[in-house]
Image: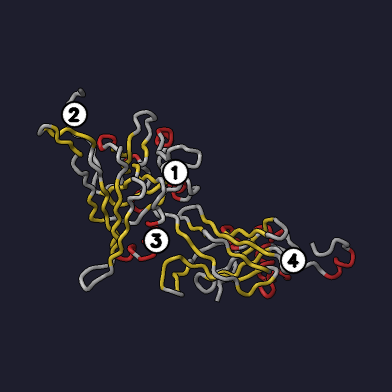
């Protein structure tokens, strides 16, 4: 039995503001924790940029603000024996939160559903900017909270005359996660505002036009927007484009990528041989991240 | 209309290219790109005496 004495004021966390989803383990099998060593060297913007823009097996996928969160644990499952309710196992804790308004675009439904069937975990960012996870008594690290596989449910609700559009997100905590292990890293120990962080975005390279052996033009968009009119992606610079010549199997230096009009880039590169096939991708991993997930193929 | 390219919009390796190469890649913008990157057009007289061409 443990002692019940407590200090006068024990730090606690506040209501949820955002969620950070992450593969529970990276490809090497290591839990994607916030380690004691990382905490000691400082949880700053550089650390966060590395997580938000990192390799996909370690990346933090940060949601927009989530509201109306209900996360109740069901009562323990009991077996009645001779009228005595014996505990069998703890009840399941469900997560139930809703995204409202512009962030609840229908395209985001697919993004949330892409986490289904995966071994994912999550950290919670509360409204005070604390990060909540699971304290690991063995390693001393803060582990992600395990999400029970195949329990994720995403429901879109159309806007009405009195309500904005919304996406309801529901899932169960992994059945063995213990509430007593929930712990937080205080916002005051994080030298960046967790509530204003931005997550990696997917951008798309549009069909190449005005193709020559030294350049082509492409319109870049987000995956969000109206049919045939996704929102343009502005602000790309030449250094974030990569071109690979599939014919000669060599990298091609991008020289310039001026933007005009917004979201349309005239990319120039070192002269290639006519009929060579180029593969073009885009990746910005400093600050707010943007990346293509599908390469653009261009025959010059 | 596209804004004029500045040095930060151009890959530094362009500074090592010949004017002729810049012309072939950038077309009508070549003069501006070459000027921004400090690449000079080799004079015809020099070309005759320099077998390496317009470097």
Q: Which residue is mark 2?
A: A6
Can you say whether A137 is above or below A46 in the image?
above
Quadrant of the snapshot with the C terminus of chain A:
bottom right
Q: Which mark is residue A110?
A: 3
Identify the secondary structure beneath mark 1: helix
Alpha carbon separation for disc pair 1 and 3: 28 Å
Can you say whether B39 is above or below A52 in the image?
below
Identify the secondary structure beneath mark 4: loop
Could you say which quadrant of the image residue B10 lies in?
Answer: bottom right
Residue shown at the point (23%, 68%) measured from the top left: A163
Residue shown at the point (33%, 40%) measured from the top left: A133
Alpha carbon separation for disc pair 1 and 2: 33 Å
Could you say which quadrant of the image residue A244 lies in?
Answer: bottom right
- The answer to whether mark 1 and mark 3 are in CB contact below 8 A is no
Residue shown at the point (68%, 75%) measured from the top left: B28
**Mark 4 or 3, which is nearer the eye?**
3
Q: Are marks 2 and 3 on the same chain?
A: yes
Q: Answer with left or right where residue A111 lies relative to residue A76.
A: right
Viewer-closest of A284 and A115: A115
Q: Which residue is mark 1?
A: A47
Identify the secondary structure beneath mark 2: loop
Q: Are marks 4 and 2 on the same chain?
A: yes
Q: Which residue is mark 4?
A: A273
Q: Residues within 10 Å of mark 3 (few under 14, many from 20)?
A: few
């Amino acid at each position: 039995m443990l002692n019940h004495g407590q200090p006068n004021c024990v730090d606690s966390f506040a209501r949820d503001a955002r969620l950070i989803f992450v593969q529970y383990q990276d490809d090497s099998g290591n839990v994607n924790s916030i380690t004691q060593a990382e905490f000691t060297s400082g949880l700053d913007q550089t650390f966060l940029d590395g997580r938000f823009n990192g390799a996909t097996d370690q990346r933090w996928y940060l949601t927009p603000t989530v509201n109306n969160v209900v996360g109740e644990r069901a009562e323990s499952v009991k077996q009645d024996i001779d009228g005595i309710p014996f505990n069998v196992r703890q009840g399941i804790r469900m997560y139930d939160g809703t995204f409202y308004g512009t962030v609840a675009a229908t395209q985001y439904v697919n993004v949330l559903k892409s986490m289904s069937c995966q071994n994912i975990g999550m950290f919670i960012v509360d409204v005070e900017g604390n990060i909540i996870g699971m304290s690991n008594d063995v390693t001393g690290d803060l582990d992600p909270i395990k999400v029970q596989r195949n329990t994720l449910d995403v429901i879109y609700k159309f806007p009405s005359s009195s309500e904005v559009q919304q996406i309801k997100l529901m899932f169960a905590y992994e059945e063995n996660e213990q509430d007593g292990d929930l712990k937080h890293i205080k916002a005051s120990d994080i030298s960046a505002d967790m509530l204003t962080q931005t997550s990696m975005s997917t951008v798309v390279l549009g069909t190449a036009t005005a193709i020559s052996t030294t350049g082509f033009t492409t319109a870049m968009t987000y995956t969000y927007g109206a049919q045939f009119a996704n929102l343009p992606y502005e602000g790309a610079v030449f250094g974030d484009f990569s071109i690979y010549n599939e014919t000669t199997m060599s990298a091609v230096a991008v020289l310039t990528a001026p933007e005009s009009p917004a979201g349309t880039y005239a990319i120039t590169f070192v002269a290639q041989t006519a009929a060579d096939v180029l593969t073009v991708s885009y990746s910005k991993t400093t600050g707010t991240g943007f990346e293509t997930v599908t390469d653009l193929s261009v025959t010059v | 209309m596209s804004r004029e390219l500045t040095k930060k919009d151009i890959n530094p390796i362009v500074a090592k290219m010949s004017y002729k190469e810049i012309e072939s890649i950038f077309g009508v913008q070549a003069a501006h790109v070459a000027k921004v990157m400090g690449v000079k057009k080799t004079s015809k007289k020099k070309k005759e005496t320099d077998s390496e061409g317009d470097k």
